[in-house]
Image (tube, rainbow, N blue to C red):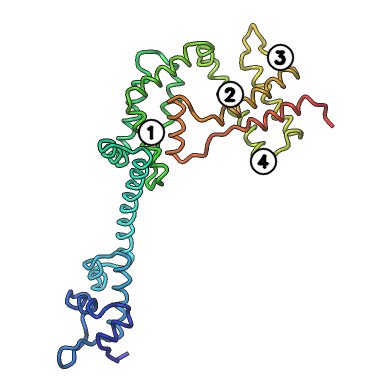
Amino acid sequence: MSELYGIGDVARRVGLSVSAVRYYADAGVVAPVASRAGGHRLYDVSGIARLELVRTLRELGAGLEDIRRVLGGEATLRELAAAHLALLERQEARLRSRRAVLSVILRQDSTAEQVTLMHKLVGMADDERDRLIDDFWSEVTAGWEPPERMVEWWRAARPELPEQPVAAQLEAWIELAELVGDTEVRQAVRRELVEACTTGVGPLMSSAPMLDRLEAGASVGQAVVDAARDQTSPDSARGREVADQWMDWLTGVFATPDDPGIPDTPEFRIQTADHMLAGAEWERTPPEGPFDRYMELVTAVNNLPPDQFPYEWLADALRASVRPVG
């Protein structure tokens, strides 16, 4: 423990160059305990240990002033680690943002103006993103009277970037922000929703009584999702029970006090099963309208799993429910 080591031996032991050991001594980080004639510096075991710590902290990116504070007892290693980790997380966030912008540039062959805009978009604060989405929906719903509950649903679907988004989320946010900021897109979404709510069966489907019935069907739809997730056989007792629940709800959707609605017949169940298969095919079709793309991008930004309804399973359960048991 009392042995002293020359600077060359110290450098080899700690994995530093002689000039680096000399630099840390001159900087007042780790000073030698003695020197030989001719000015050759000597270090004890404690000095070697301190130099090993310096090398480790430098490799972790710590600055000399922070290292000097730790060695001098002015700061603890835990405090240094916490401060440095926060710095690395900020750097990592900036790198993810840059990566997202560069990825979009490569895909789109963007102009200089677009690059500037994208860089601004990824650096938006939460309240700025909220204002952008609110402005979008305010314009889309202006000038007509959409169902209030539908507006609530539309506005509720909004992007929420986490504190540490992955590159795919940032890329989706860039596209979404460009989408909602485009005047032509806003007009197209407005036309799409106006047509959906005011033409054909739109007024009926967006009426308050119908929305109540559709909301009431959420628990039935969840029963279908749960049965499919549990790999329940469509021809099992539980499968038939879920099919019956679905038909009880479906036949009542269009019922009124004066009209009992569509009767639950084997033929209607088969027809409904065919509609379920058509629904599955429709869901696999890439989104065509800007509103569908908006919803797809919100899902990507929020890193949510695609909302896939088990149409095929329900179709099989409906067909099985019209066959004799056993």
Contact flag, marks 1 and 3 (Cβ < 8 Å): no
**Residue at the right extreme of this rendering:** 326
Q: Earlier in the sequence, mark 2 or mark 1?
A: 1
Which mark is on residue 176? Answer: 1
Crowdedness of circle 1 by 10 Å Cα count: few (<14), some, many (20+)? many
Q: Earlier in the sequence, mark 3 or mark 2?
A: 2
Which mark is on residue 263? Answer: 3
Foreground: disc 2 or disc 4:
4
**Residue at the bottom extreme of this rendering:** 37
- Res. 10 image quadrant: bottom left
Q: Residue at x 29, y 86 (%)?
A: 9
Q: Earlier in the sequence, mark 1 or mark 4?
A: 1
Q: Earlier in the sequence, mark 4 or mark 3?
A: 4
Q: What's the CA distance linking mark 1 and mark 3?
A: 44 Å
Foreground: disc 1 or disc 4:
1
Q: What's the CA distance linking mark 1 and mark 4?
A: 35 Å
Q: Residue at x 36, y 42 (%)?
A: 106
Q: Amino acid at mark 3?
A: Pro
Q: Nearer the viewer, residue 306 or 47?
A: 306
Q: Residue at x 49, y 28 (%)?
A: 287
Q: Nearer the viewer, residue 115 or 71?
A: 115
Give how far across and how far down residue 261 sits, in percent.
66, 12
The residue carrying mark 2 is 216
Crowdedness of circle 2 by 10 Å Cα count: few (<14), some, many (20+)? few
